[in-house]
């Protein structure tokens, strides 16, 4: 296993940097750098720029519009995008549903839905969790009952999803629904694509600790869904669900985000003072900073090891859980240190300061206004995509056989 980048990979890195310098709008990178909230139009704009270059669906095979990158090239791309403060790729269509359709969808589904993910015709959200079905995801109760009438083969869906990220922007939701109540719980689940503009779908906001409207509840009351929107076989949706979660977890680890956030943190620590000296020279703070930097270096190496294994034909399994746990702990620690480093400036939480056009007090360096909000927002990282406790259960089962 060679963890050094080859000459070709370094040339690829230069190509990505040149692209970002040329095409990433400064307006967008400044928003990301300052921790501002991205509007739907911002995310769509960045998706369109990447799609025009053929780089949006970088995990997809070339035949469906992927760029044909190696795992290492994907890693470099994500890293460079984070360092340039590019908006993140919204994962639900491109990184989650896309791979599921490619693996489990039929040809009609692939040829209809995949291009619409690429050109932004559809905005997808993820309908997995329900009240009472989070960690125990296989306990989903939202029901889909099949029937045939004059308008054709269909399902009638009733139930509730929760924590649906960016569902307020979505016109489509992929859902785990219960199609058999008699079978063992994992064997009665199906993977269904639902049009959110259908009669009977209602989206209600949930406001999180950081004052933001990022997540929602979605209610289904007698929603009619064409049977052709079933992905894979009926009652075999658990297989799709697990496959998708592996992608989701590796994505959440976000090594690139941590590298960029650590650079910002070091900048703050160099300018903020404590007892007349730069904070970076304070032994207690410097020790925490060094600890998280070492952890991040280790994490990068682990990530590259996983990538090397995948490039050699392996499939990420328990490794994606390991990456999720360590990656999110590191991201949370950096956001915690950033808030501390701001001292009194990191304390005030001004929701409006995260919106475009805010001209009020920013409490010191521009980043300060976002420090408290980022801290609050990043608490989610150890919960979603399967909580870190659940990841530990997975590791103990898969690696230790417990
Ligand atoms: C900001 C945010 C965005 C989200 N976005 C989405 C989304 O877009 N779509 C979607 O479908 N879901 C989404 N989720 C839901 C997320 O996946 C769940 O919150 C998560 O799986 C935990 O489930 P729960 O909230 O029901 O908590 P619970 O399952 O009730 O867990 C509560 C606590 O108990 C612990 N626990 C539970 N069972 C065990 C066990 N067996 N062993 C050890 N500890 C255990 C958990 O670790 C946790 O600390 C999001 C969540 C958040 C916070």
Image: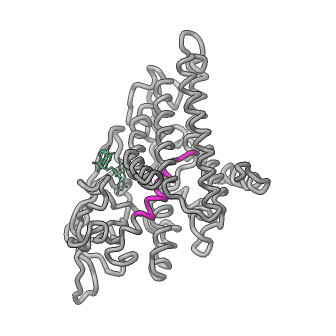
Seen in the picture, residue 322 relative to 65 is either above or below; the reply is above
Q: Position of residue 391 (x, y in %)?
A: 41, 49
Q: Position of residue 111 (x, y in %)?
A: 50, 79
Seen in the picture, residue 96 relative to 38 is either above or below; the reply is below
Magenta stretch: helix, strand or loop mostly? helix
Q: Position of residue 74 (x, y in %)?
A: 62, 57
Seen in the picture, residue 133 relative to 116 is either above or below; the reply is above
Residue placed furthest toward the bottom = 150
Which of the 4 image quadrants contains residue 243? bottom left
* 90 or 313, nearer to the observer: 313
Q: How is the image coloured?
A: one colour
Magenta span covers which residues? Answer: 242-255
What residue is at 53 percent from the left and 57 percent from the top?
45
Q: Is residue 382 magenta?
A: no
Residue placed furthest toward the top = 275
What residue is at 31 percent from the left and 79 percent from the top?
226
* 22 or 296, nearer to the observer: 296
The answer to whether residue 166 is visible is yes
């Amino acid at each position: 296993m060679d963890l050094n980048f080859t000459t070709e990979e370094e040339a690829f890195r230069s190509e990505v940097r040149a692209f970002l310098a040329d095409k990433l709008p400064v307006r967008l990178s400044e928003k990301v750098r300052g921790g501002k909230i991205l509007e739907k139009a911002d995310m769509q704009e960045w998706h369109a720029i990447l799609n025009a270059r053929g780089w949006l669906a970088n995990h997809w095979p070339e035949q469906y519009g992927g760029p044909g990158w190696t795992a290492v090239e994907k890693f470099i791309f994500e890293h460079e995008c984070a360092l340039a403060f590019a908006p993140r790729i919204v994962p639900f269509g491109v990184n989650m549903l896309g791979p599921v359709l490619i693996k489990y969808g039929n040809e009609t589904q692939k040829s209809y839905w995949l291009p619409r993910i690429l050109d932004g015709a559809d905005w997808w959200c993820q309908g997995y969790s329900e009240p009472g079905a989070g960690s125990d995801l296989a306990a989903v109760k939202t029901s889909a009952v099949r029937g045939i009438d004059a308008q054709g083969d269909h399902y009638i869906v009733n139930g509730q999803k929760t924590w649906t990220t960016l569902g307020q922007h979505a016109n489509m939701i992929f859902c785990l629904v219960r199609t058999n109540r008699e079978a063992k719980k994992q064997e009665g689940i199906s993977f269904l694509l639902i049009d959110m503009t259908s009669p009977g779908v209602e989206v209600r906001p949930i406001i999180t600790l950081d004052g933001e409207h990022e997540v929602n509840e979605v209610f289904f009351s007698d929603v009619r869904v064409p049977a052709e929107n079933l992905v894979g076989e009926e009652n075999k949706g658990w297989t799709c669900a697990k496959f998708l979660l592996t992608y989701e977890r590796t994505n959440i680890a976000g090594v690139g985000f941590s590298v960029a956030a650590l650079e910002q943190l070091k900048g703050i620590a160099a300018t903020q003072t404590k007892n007349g000296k730069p904070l970076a020279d304070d032994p207690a703070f410097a020790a925490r900073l060094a600890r998280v930097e070492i952890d991040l270096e280790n994490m990068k190496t682990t990530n590259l090891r996983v990538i090397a294994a995948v490039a050699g034909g392996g499939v990420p399994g328990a490794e994606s859980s390991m990456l999720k746990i360590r990656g999110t702990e590191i991201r949370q620690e950096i956001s915690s240190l950033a808030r501390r480093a701001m001292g009194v400036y990191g304390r005030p939480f001004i929701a409006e300061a995260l919106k475009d056009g805010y001209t009020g007090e920013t409490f010191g360096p521009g980043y300060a206004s976002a420090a408290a909000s980022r801290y609050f927002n990043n608490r989610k990282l150890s919960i979603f995509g399967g909580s870190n406790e659940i990841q530990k259960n997975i590791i103990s089962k898969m690696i230790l056989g417990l």
